[in-house]
Amino acid sequence: MIKVVAIVGPTAVGKSALGLKIAQKLNGEIISGDSMQIYRNLDIGTAKDSPEELRLVPHHLVDICNPDQRYTVKDFQKKARDIITKLDAENKLPLVVGGTGFYLSSLINNLNLGGKNSGSSVRPKLLAIEQNGGIEELQSVLKKLDPVAFDKIDIDNPRRVMRAIEVIKTTGASITSQNDGSKWADFYLVGLNDDRPKLYDRINRRVDKMVDMGLLDEAKYVYDHRDEFLQAKNGIGYKELFPYFAGQSDLNTCLFELKKNSRHFAKRQLTYFRNQMDVDWYNISEDTNYQTTIENKIVKFMGENSNE
């Protein structure tokens, strides 16, 4: 059976840095499991690896869409599976790195997400609900129809909320239970975490660094195209700065909101991975040798024969 390693955890904890080291040492290639790094020209706010880092090892599912293109979980699932199958045939380590939990769940659990036209008759009504009542109204609809999905998916993403509503309305089953029952690959999930005060400090410092790198210009680009960038405009790192560009708030207030939302997002990520997946967790402050330990466990995992 195909063996796949995934590195998960909250934002700013160091997933990308570990992924680069593991890929270099173990003949691996990185598959981004982040829902925002697919977009071209959105580099700072999405915390992509630097151009130098991207050249160190091959990266997949990074910079594959323009910001005005729609990209679904189903798109990720198919593309990632095709890449993993190809890498396995080449005797390379498929290494999924990212913090978008539902993306990874769709891959691991082989979720049946339906075809492109599934729920198409429902979508216009949901778009009208979003236009009139905003994301909060969509969330209310989902919570009433499918409380399980409400607790599991990224409810701050309106397109993901709409998709979950479409699935429950058209199939009668939750999008979180659309599993076809087959196991196509063996996954080893490595989770990075840190003591909460240290993690939150890392997040705050990352935001400050992003600002120094030019986040405001990138966010202004998204703001100026917000009617076209329907998915990208909802990304944390961009939407919090919109009131500043609109003259409705000062910059410090917006940056405070950005840091707060990033911390809340980290908390949601941890909750999702802890509750929904079997993850081998490492506290990066408590275990100074975690990188070596993880590398050795991956080597052992890749050498094991699956009885599935």
Image: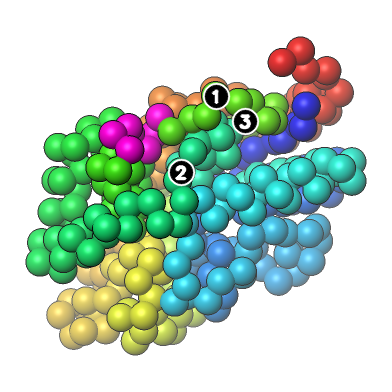
Residue 68 - label: none
Label 3 near label 2: C-beta < 8 Å?
A: no
Position of the C terminus, as image quadrant, is: top right
Residue 181 - label: 1
Asked whether, in this view, residue 110 is left or right of residue 296, the answer is left
Region rendered in magenta: 171-177
Asked whether, in this view, residue 195 is left or right of residue 95, the answer is left
- Between residue 283 and residue 161, name the one nearer to us: 161
Q: Which of marks 2 and 1 is nearer the N terminus?
A: 2
The answer to which image quadrant residue 207 occupies is bottom left
Q: Nearer the viewer, mark 2 or mark 3?
A: 2
Label 1 near label 3: C-beta < 8 Å?
A: no
Q: Is residue 88 above or below residue 109?
A: below
Residue projecting furthest to the left = 132
Q: Mark 3 points at which residue?
A: 189
Specify few, some or many for label 1: CA neighbours under 10 Å numbering under 14, 14-19, or 20 or more: few
- Between residue 84 and residue 55, name the one nearer to us: 84
Kindly identify the amino acid type of the residue bearing the numbered disc 2.
Leu
Q: Which residue is drawn at 15% across and 80% down?
A: 248
The answer to which image quadrant residue 283 occupies is top right
Q: Does the magenta stretch include residue 78?
A: no
Q: Which residue is drawn at 18% across and 60% down?
A: 125
Kindly identify the amino acid type of the residue bearing the numbered disc 1.
Gly
Kindly identify the amino acid type of the residue bearing the numbered disc 3.
Leu
Residue 156 visible? The answer is no
Q: Find residue 218 and report its horizontal and vertical position in percent.
A: 45, 80
Alpha carbons under labels 2 and 3: distance apart: 22 Å
Position of the N terminus, as image quadrant, is: top right
Specify few, some or many for label 2: CA neighbours under 10 Å numbering under 14, 14-19, or 20 or more: many
Q: What colour scheme governs how the chains and residues are painted in the rendered image of this protein?
A: rainbow
Q: Mark 2 points at which residue?
A: 113
Label 1: element kind: loop
